[in-house]
Image: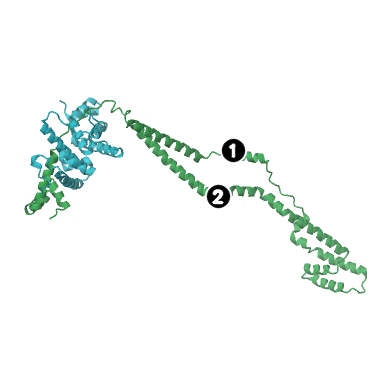
Chain colours: A green, B cyan
């Protein structure tokens, strides 16, 4: 019959008189009925007696204290303090590094875009201006061409283009009837009208056409008021720009990392040296 | 001769000599406790010294009651610190080196030389056998069995010293005794005549 752990605990407690009355009665009854339990108790009792006879050892020295031993200053407090400071600085360094890397990953991605935007802002006006200049010139050119056309048309009407322009320009209203009339008239080469009448008619036609020139539909204001060139950003000479770039920027994170790293290593070494000396 | 309580009061007032009187009264108990737990004389001496220094500094935390159990609690903590420190370092041999540079085979440097040679031999062998078996127990089991069976504390005081519940003390003590019984069986020829049937049941 195997004795359970619980039985061993009961026997051990019974041996030391640490059982309550109910447990005591129970174990005593079992001891009467179970010889295996009784023998186990005997074994444990002998073990206890053996341990109780353990010889007392002579002390190798007296352990009386001297004032230096309890003086506080002689205790290994500095090593503990250094170790604590070193650990603290290491934790802070890790924290700063994490923040620094976080900043790098979060803002670092945006950092290259910022200068580009600034540069674009700086040059946008001039670039837009430069881009718009040809258009303005084109528009002015159109305007002049329109004027020339109008003048030539007024002076010497072209038989083929004038009606077409008139048809484009005047689509509704009374002018339609007029243009149709003009068209019909222009097709009659060999008519009996006088040259003066024709000139008058073409003059009227040209007047109508002046109202709907193509250039007027494109940029009507340009024809009236010339747009002054917008102010352009004045860039300094290259040397000045490079001088600005060369100004060293002190990153507080770098400074903290250097200070904490140096401190952690220094205090760690100091702790190691002190402990090594003591041991 | 001053009473223990008077010595404690004077020590609290900063009288180191009074505390040294207390040390002289308890140093054998403390050293034996430390030696049986750690198993190495040098480490036990270090732990004992540390325990007395700590006791002097923490004397204001003593609130009356058994001074012995209060002191043993401090010793147990000092032993645990020393035990952990020794575990991190290379093992120091149990037996010191003799003049010829070889390890001495027994802890004879700790023996009482006033005994008869036969008694000295018997004590040494018994001490070695018990220490051998104690060293094979886990640290907490060893501490409990030393407190109860060697120092003679009751369960409640032992539980207070190691800061564990009473049930833990009961179960660990039973297991420790059971393991010691099996271990001591191998040394039965070394045990005193009346104890040689240990483990035969």
Tell me which chain the residue with mark 2 is part of.
A
Residue at image coords 77%, 61%: A215
Q: CA distance from mark 2 to mark 1?
A: 22 Å
For the residues beneath circles 2 and 1, the answer to whether they share a chain is: yes
**Dot 1: few (<14), some (14–19), or many (≥20) neighbours within 10 Å?**
few
Q: Quadrant of residue B184?
A: top left
Residue at image coords 48%, 37%: A258
**Dot 2: few (<14), some (14–19), or many (≥20) neighbours within 10 Å?**
few
Q: Identify the mark at residue A110; answer none if there is no mark.
A: 2
Residue A24 in view in this figure: no
Q: Position of residue A253 (x, y in %)?
A: 49, 41
Residue sitting nearer the eye, A135 or A147: A135
Q: Secondary structure at mark 1?
A: loop
From the image, tell me which residue sits under label 1.
Answer: A247
Q: Is residue B47 above or below residue A189?
A: above
Q: Secondary structure at mark 2?
A: loop
N-term mark: 2 or 1: 2
* Left or right, residue A198 beside residue B74: right
Q: Identify the mark at residue A106; answer none if there is no mark.
A: none
* Left or right, residue A104 beside residue A48: right
Say which quadrant the N terminus of chain B sits in.
top left
């Amino acid at each position: 019959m195997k004795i359970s752990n619980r039985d061993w605990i009961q026997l051990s407690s019974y041996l030391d008189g640490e059982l309550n009355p109910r447990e005591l009665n129970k174990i005593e009854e079992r001891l009467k009925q179970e010889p295996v339990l009784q023998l186990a108790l005997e074994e444990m009792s002998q073990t206890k007696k053996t341990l109780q006879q353990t010889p007392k050892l002579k002390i190798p020295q007296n352990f009386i204290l001297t004032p230096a031993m309890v003086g506080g200053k002689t205790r290994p407090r500095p090593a503990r303090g250094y170790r604590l400071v070193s650990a603290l600085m290491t934790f802070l360094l890790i924290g700063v590094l994490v923040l620094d890397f976080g900043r790098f990953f979060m803002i670092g991605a945006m950092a290259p875009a910022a200068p580009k935007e600034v540069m674009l802002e700086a040059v946008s006006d001039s670039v837009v201006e430069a881009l718009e200049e040809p258009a303005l010139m084109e528009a002015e050119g159109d305007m002049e061409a329109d004027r020339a056309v109008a003048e030539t048309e007024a002076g010497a009407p072209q038989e083929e283009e004038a009606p077409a322009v008139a048809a484009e320009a005047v689509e509704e209203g009374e002018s339609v009837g007029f243009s149709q009339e003009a068209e019909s008239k222009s097709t009659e080469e060999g008519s009996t009208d006088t040259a003066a009448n024709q000139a008058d008619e073409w003059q009227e036609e040209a007047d109508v056409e002046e109202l709907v020139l193509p250039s007027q539909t494109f940029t009507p204001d340009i024809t009236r008021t010339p747009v002054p060139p917008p102010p352009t950003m004045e860039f300094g000479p290259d040397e000045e720009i490079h001088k600005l770039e060369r100004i060293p920027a002190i990153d507080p994170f770098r400074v903290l990392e250097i200070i904490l790293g140096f401190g952690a290593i220094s205090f760690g070494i100091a702790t190691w040296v002190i402990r090594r000396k003591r041991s | 001769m001053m009473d223990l309580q008077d010595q404690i009061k004077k020590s609290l007032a900063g009288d180191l000599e009074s505390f040294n009187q207390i040390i002289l009264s308890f140093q054998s108990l403390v050293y034996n406790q430390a030696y049986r737990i750690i198993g190495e004389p040098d480490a036990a001496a270090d732990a004992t010294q540390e325990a007395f220094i700590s006791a002097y500094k923490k004397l204001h935390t003593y609130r009356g009651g058994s001074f012995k159990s209060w002191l043993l609690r401090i010793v147990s903590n000092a032993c645990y610190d020393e035990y952990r420190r020794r575990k991190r370092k290379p093992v120091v041999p149990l037996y010191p080196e003799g003049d010829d540079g070889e390890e001495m085979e027994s802890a004879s440097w700790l023996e009482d030389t006033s005994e008869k040679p036969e008694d000295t031999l018997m004590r040494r062998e018994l001490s070695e056998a018990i220490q051998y078996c104690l060293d094979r127990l886990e640290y907490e089991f060893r501490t409990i069995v030393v407190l109860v069976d060697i120092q003679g504390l009751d369960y409640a005081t032992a539980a207070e010293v190691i800061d564990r519940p009473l049930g833990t003390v009961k179960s660990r003590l039973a297991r420790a005794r059971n393991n010691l019984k099996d271990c001591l069986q191998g040394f039965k020829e070394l045990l005193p005549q009346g104890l040689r049937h240990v483990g035969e049941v």
